[in-house]
Image (cartoon, helix red, strand yellow):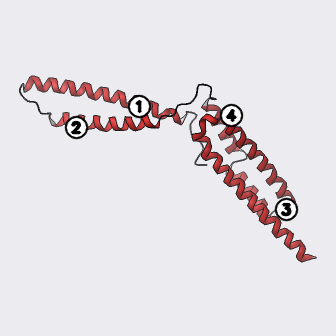
Amino acid sequence: HLLIPVSPLDPGQKPIAKVGQHSQYLQFLTILLAVQQFDNGLKLESSQTLDEVSQEWLKAAEIIMSKRESQVRKQVERPPSSAPFVELFREIRGFWKTMGGIENLINLLDEIADGDVEKAKKREYNWQASASAFIERLENKYESYEDITTPFVVGIRCVKQGFRSGLVRRLSVAEQGAWQIE
């Protein structure tokens, strides 16, 4: 469940907002430095060196500039035709709260491990079909959000593979037991 978005805001837009914040802070620091230099110029007409406060502001500006550049590289541009992120958020949260929820997965796993073999087989097949349909919908409808959907889809496929392997193992054990009884 670590891959599930926690907010309906597109994470690809977060760097854009941070760039704006960094730009505003840089503008503020620039104004502070200009005022400080002007004030220093009035006090010490011949001094060309920066005082300690100005040097700290200049260092802060350099750090903010590097952070801003880092955020610019992280920006994700989505095509205008892409579905709203809030829809993807709702789909993923809905899957997680229903068939992808931990309690549901544990119940299915328990049934595969210890329950009625035929019932477990049907339930596992149904879960596989539903999970496959969900993956297909994510990949087709939200292809411009692959930075978010890909890790989630990989996680679902791992769970699918684990359930199928568990069921195959259980069926082979049940089949061997049937042979031993005869």
The 10 Å Cα crowd at callout 3, few under 14, some 14 to 19, many 20 or more, is: some
Q: Earlier in the sequence, mark 3 or mark 2?
A: 2
Query: Which mark is in front, 1 or 4?
Result: 4
Identified by mark 2, the residue type is Glu
The 10 Å Cα crowd at callout 4, few under 14, some 14 to 19, many 20 or more, is: few
Disc 2 secondary structure class: helix
Q: Residue at x 89, y 74 (%)?
A: 179
Q: Residue at x 42, y 36 (%)?
A: 71
The 10 Å Cα crowd at callout 2, few under 14, some 14 to 19, many 20 or more, is: few
> What residue did someone put label 1 on?
19
Q: Earlier in the sequence, mark 1 or mark 4?
A: 1
Residue 58 is left or right of residue 121, and the answer is left
Q: Do the numbered discs 3 and 2 sit on residues whose CB atoms are within 8 Å? A: no
- Can the viewer see residue 5? no
Q: CA distance from mark 1 to mark 4?
A: 29 Å
Disc 4 secondary structure class: helix
> What residue did someone put label 4 on?
141
Q: Earlier in the sequence, mark 1 or mark 3?
A: 1
Q: Is residue 73 above or below residue 44?
A: below
The 10 Å Cα crowd at callout 1, few under 14, some 14 to 19, many 20 or more, is: many
Identified by mark 3, the residue type is Val
Identified by mark 4, the residue type is Lys
> What residue did someone put label 2 on?
56
Q: Earlier in the sequence, mark 3 or mark 4?
A: 3
> What residue did someone put label 3 on?
117
Q: Position of residue 110 (x, y in %)?
A: 75, 60
Q: CA distance from mark 2 to mark 1?
A: 21 Å
